[in-house]
Amino acid sequence: DYTMVPQEKAGFDFLYFSMDKLGLTRQDNTIALSDDNVVYANCNTIRYIITLDANGGETNQSKAVYYGDYITDITIPTKSYTVSFNLGDHICTETAIQGFNGFYYNNSEIIDSNGTAVQPWNIATSATIIANWINSSVTVPSTEKVGYTFNGWSLDSENLGVLKSYTP
């Protein structure tokens, strides 16, 4: 007699051994050896849930994927910020849209900036992949006031006139 030991394979859960391809005849782990024995391992494929974290942007998502498959049907997230400048007699606002630079897992690009998976899901676990953003800045407005010279904006009272653009 021979005792069969199931081999682990990423992305699959072993269920049982069978003597037929369809898995209709369940076989225990011990069989008598003969030249014509063919034994099949019956497994379930594991479905992983991948969370796409927009990392401060809009549209977090969850996708189901099997090991070795590509994540598909991605909605590209968006991210922007608005900066308000107090000009004394009115408020001026500037809005910047940050560029989406893909989703990453452990510093490895999984989905590119166009929303296309660049590699199959070869990680045998559910996980969260994080959006990466290209920094953008707003140009701060200049102002004119009779009798004054405008030197630029500042974020605090100690760094007067140093800010020409702003990136959060």
Image (cartoon, rainbow, N blue to C red):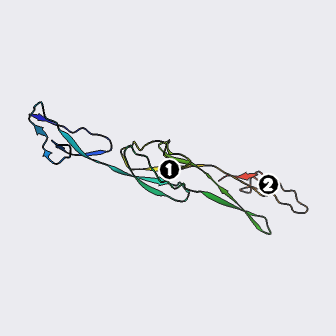
Image coordinates of residue 96 in percent, x first then y, are 67, 56
Residue 141 rendering spot, x and y as whole percentages? 78, 58
Which of these two is toward me, 8 or 115? 115
Give the mark, 2 or 1, whose residue is nearer the N terminus: 1
Residue flagged by tag 2: what amino acid is it? Gly
Q: Which residue: 56% across, 48% down?
A: 114
> Closer to the camera, 66 or 107?
66
What is the CA distance from the residue labelled 2 to the residue labelled 1? 36 Å
Pointer 2: what residue?
152
Q: How many residues crowd mark 2 within 10 Å: few (<14), some (14–19), many (20+)?
A: some
Q: Amino acid at mark 1?
A: Ile
Quarter that holds the N terminus: top left
For the residue pair 48 and 22, the one nearer the viewer reads as: 22
Q: Residue furthest right?
A: 147
Residue at position x 59%, y 57% from top?
79
Residue 28 shown left or right of residue 120 in the figure: left
Q: Nearer the viewer, residue 122 or 165?
A: 122
Per the image, the residue denoted by label 1 is 130
Q: How many marks?
A: 2
